[in-house]
Image (cartoon, helix red, strand yellow):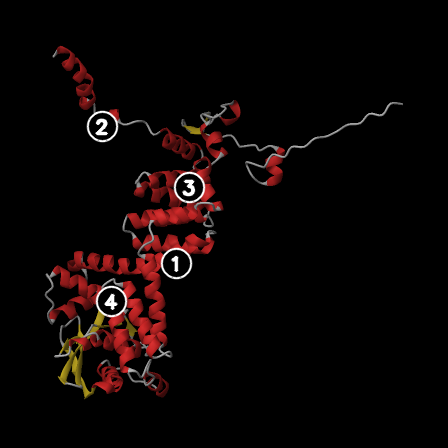
Amino acid sequence: MRFLKLLALPLLIGLALPASAQQRPDKGLDKLERARTANPSSVAALRSLGIAYFKRDRFADARTVLDAARKLDPKDGVSALYAGLAAEKLNDFTGAKDAYNSYLQVGKTRKVRNDIRARLVALSRAELRAAAKSAIARESQLAPDANNPRAVAVLPMTFSGTDQTLAPLSRGMSDLLINDLARSPELQLLEREQIQAMVDEIALSQSGRVDAATSLRAGKLVRASRVVQGAITQTGARNLTVNAAVMSVASAQQQGKDVQSSDVLDQIFAIEKTIALGLFDQLGVRLSAADRAAIEQRPTRSLQAFLAYSNGLVAEDEGRFGDAARFYEQARSIDPGFGAALQKAQGARAAQVGATVTAATVESNLRNSTEGAVVTTGTGIGSTLASAVGDINPSAANNVNSATSTGQGQTQTQTPPTTRDPASEKTGTDAPATKTGTVTIVIRRP
C-alpha cells in the first residue's frame, strides 16, 4: 500500500503544477521571435514567425506579423497567402479577400492560384452572410438619413399558386428587374445576392417568419433608400399576374401606384418588361430612347431555359453550388445563347470547388514549389535565423545584444550588418550551390 502511495505521489505533484509549468517550451517559436526582435525589418523573419503562429492556431498574432511583412514587401506572395488564411480563420472576410487578391497578383504557384480563385468565389457568399449578421447586430445604430438616395433594392418576389414548380420564377423575375433597372445611370441597384442574404438572415432571426415589414427592414439594413417588392400569382393553369410597388425606407410609405401586368405564362418576359417600365415611372426616372431599346433586350426567349435558370438561383442562394451549376448548364443547353446562364454556371462551379478549399489544401499544393521551399526550408528564414539569434555557430559577428547610447539617457539595440561571402554576393543568395572539381598540375622535367 505504501508503495502505491509513493508511486502516485509524482502524478499528484504533476497535476498540482500550473498548466504553464507542465507545457514544454516551444524552442522553435522562441528562436523565430528572437529573430524578429533582432531584425524587425526583415521580411523573412516576419514571414516565418507569422507562418509559425498560424500553424499554432494563433491566428490574430499571425495576421499582425504577416501584414507587417506585406507592408515591407508587397510582392511577397507567401506572406499575402498566409495573411489571407489567417484573416479567414478570424472571419475577417474582407481582409482575407484583400490578401488573396494580392497573392493572385504576385503569387507564383499555379495550383495555389487556382485554389485561391475558387476560394474567392465561395468566400463572397460567406462575406454576404457575415455582413448581414453584422448589420442586424447593429441595426439600432443605423441612421435612416445615411441611406443613399439613389440606392434601390429589389426584394425577391413572393409566389402563390397551385403549381409549385413555378415558384422559382420569383427569384428569376427579381433578377430580370435588377438587370433592367440597373441600365439607368440615375439608379444604383444593389446586388441580388446581397439582398437575398439579408432577407434570409432576417428570416432566421425571426424564426422563419417573414412579413410585409421584412422588405423595409432589409432595405434599411442594406442602406437602400427605396425598395421594390412584389408578388407573382398564378391565376390559372397557364396564367400569371405580377404586382410590384416602390416603398420609401425612411417613411415606410408606398411611392406612387402599384404596377401590374397579367398574361399567359409563355409571355413572362413581356410581363417583366411591362413591370420594369412601370417601375421606372414610379421611381421618377425618364428613359432615353437608347435606354428603352436596351431594356427591350431579352436574355432568353425560352420559358424552360429561364425556369431552369431560376431553379439555379434558388440552389445557389441555399449554398447548393453543384445543383446550381447543373441547373444553369441545363438552361444553357436549352438555349445556347443564354449568356447569363453560362456566367452563372462558371461561378457556381468555382464556388463548388472553393467551398472545399482549406488551409490544408493550399499547403498541400505549395509542396514541391519554390514558395513551398520558403515555408519549409530552415523554418522559412534560413541563415537569417542564425545571424539574428546567434545560436548556431555563435560568434562576435552575429552578437545582437550590443547596446549603444542614444544621447538621451536611453540605450538602443543595434544589429551589426550582415556580411556575405564573395560567392553569396555574386550569386545573390545566402546559400549558393557549392561546386567541386579536380585540378591536375603537370610539372615537366627540364
Determine the secondary structure under disc 4: helix
User: Mark 4 — residue?
Assistant: 315
Q: CA distance from mark 2 to mark 1?
A: 42 Å
Mark 4: amino acid: Ala
Determine the residue positioned at 38% across, 49% down: 362
Q: Quadrant of residue 179?
A: bottom left
* Amino acid on which disc 3 is placed: Arg
Is any part of residue 88 visible from this angle?
yes
Specify whether 236 is left or right of 382: left
Q: Marks 3 and 4: in contact by CB < 8 Å?
A: no
Q: CA distance from mark 4 to mark 1?
A: 21 Å
Q: Which mark is residue 117?
A: 1
Query: Where residue 348 appears, x then y in whole percent?
Result: 32, 65
Q: Nearer the viewer, residue 6 or 287?
A: 6
List x then y, in percent, for residue 134. 21, 56
Q: Quadrant of the N terminus?
A: top left
Q: Is residue 125 above or below residue 18?
A: below
Q: Which residue corresponds to mark 2?
A: 19
Q: Quadrant of the C terminus?
A: top right
The residue type indicated by label 2 comes to Ala
In this figure, which residue is indicated by the disc labeled 3?
A: 47
The reply to whether callout 2 and callout 1 are in contact (CB within 8 Å) is no
